[in-house]
Amino acid sequence: MKITTNRDDILKPLLQVGSVVERRQTLPILANVLIQATPDQLAITATDLEVELKTKAPVHAEGEAEFTLPARKLIDICKALPDGSEISIDVEGDKAVLRSGRGRYTLGTLPAQDYPAIEPSAAGDRLEIPEKVLKHLIENTAFAMAQQDVRYYLNGMLLEIRGNTIRSVATDGHRLALADAEIDSDADLNLQIILPRKAVLEIGRLLSDSDDTAVLEISGSHIRLHLNETTFTSKLIDGRFPDYERVMPGMDTQEVIADREMLRQALARTAILSNEKYRGIRFRLSPGLLHLQAHNPEQDEAEEEVEIDYDGPEMTIGFNVGYLLDVLGVIHSDKVRMAVSDSNTSSLVTALDNEDARYVIMPMRL
């Protein structure tokens, strides 16, 4: 069985599926990709038993075949070949010989029938959404997901669909990110699902800023995403997401308006001398002025002043500077608004001209 293709045609799909393959495996075959060849294309699949990614590449093949190859080695060989190289793969028994130019690489295969597949139950709900809308929701909230929290439902992102509104929410217990988008949908859905962290990151990588349609199929335990030649499947987190509405600050707040880029740069400079472990920074508000201060155990200290639009009482609040920088990194408006009330109450950060995305940051004791 011989397969011929171009290095540029096969490398992109290999890189796509390669991100799913974990470096440390519980089963040796999970280090491989499943390759299903037909006369004019390869279907390439990778899985870690939680998520599965399948995509296609154009090839010329002498017939049909199924086999698996070591993902990392195959990708590294293709990456190292010159642009536009012709590649041939000969599969005989438990060996595959890859040739390109004067190079010859022999790789061991494992039986395709041993390759595990994620078989979701029949999809109960289906939703079509523009790629750029879903990408925007993920970009605006994914950074606030927890990592390895014992509250496993925080290690992911809530996707809430209500009629023509879709909302993404992520929180690690110290901050919360929420984004809304309107969609044209005939499907009158009313559901909440929690996507695991790895699925959120993989979907974010697959999506583009185009108006192309992404199709979501949702069952009780899985979500499947269809994008042109690519299909991504993931298990869902079985848990109850916190009532995020309860942590949204109330109306009894003071308003701070600042130039986003000026504030971001001042925070980045002040953060250099903050405590590396706790990242605390002191906000001292007075009419028209924000005074920033940070210090660390080595007795270093940083101070900055930023002109703001604020006419409330003088107030001092501590924040984790990393959380603020994350928020300012995903807001693209020229001006940002902070709603603050006192040193013990969470603050709400939004773009001045658009509140489709909202960010809640808990204060720190300094």
Image: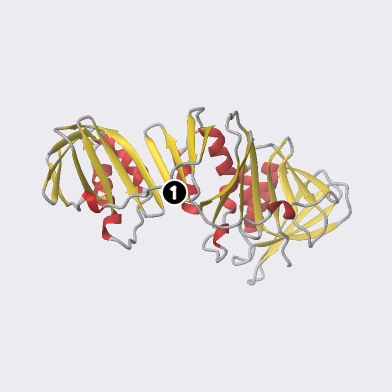
Instruction: Point out residue 25 in the picture as x, y percentages from the top left corner.
Output: 33, 61
Q: Is residue 180 left or right of residue 231?
A: right
Residue nearest the viewer, comparing 39 with 136: 39
Q: Tell me the SS state at disc 1.
A: strand
Q: Is residue 353 above or below residue 233?
A: above
For the rendered model, the colour scheme is secondary structure
Image quadrant for the C terminus?
bottom right
Residue found 30% across the figure and 39% down from its top: 11
Q: Is residue 266 above or below residue 184?
A: below
Point 54% across, 61% down: residue: 152
Q: Horizontal and vertical percent for residue 69?
A: 22, 49
Left or right, 265 with reference to 77: right
Q: Name the residue located 38 percent from the left edge and 37 percent from the top edge.
A: 230
Q: Nearer the viewer, residue 50 or 259?
A: 50
Q: Is residue 316 left or right of residue 325?
A: right
Q: Quadrant of the N terminus?
A: top left
Question: Residue at coordinates 84% horizontally, 58% vertically from top-left?
Answer: 315
Q: Quadrant of residue 188?
A: top right
Residue 266 visible here: yes
Mark 1 residue crowding within 10 angstroms, few (<14) / some (14–19) / many (20+): many
Total labels: the figure holds 1
Q: Which residue position holds label 1?
A: 234
Looking at the rendered structure, the kind of residue marked 1 is Ser
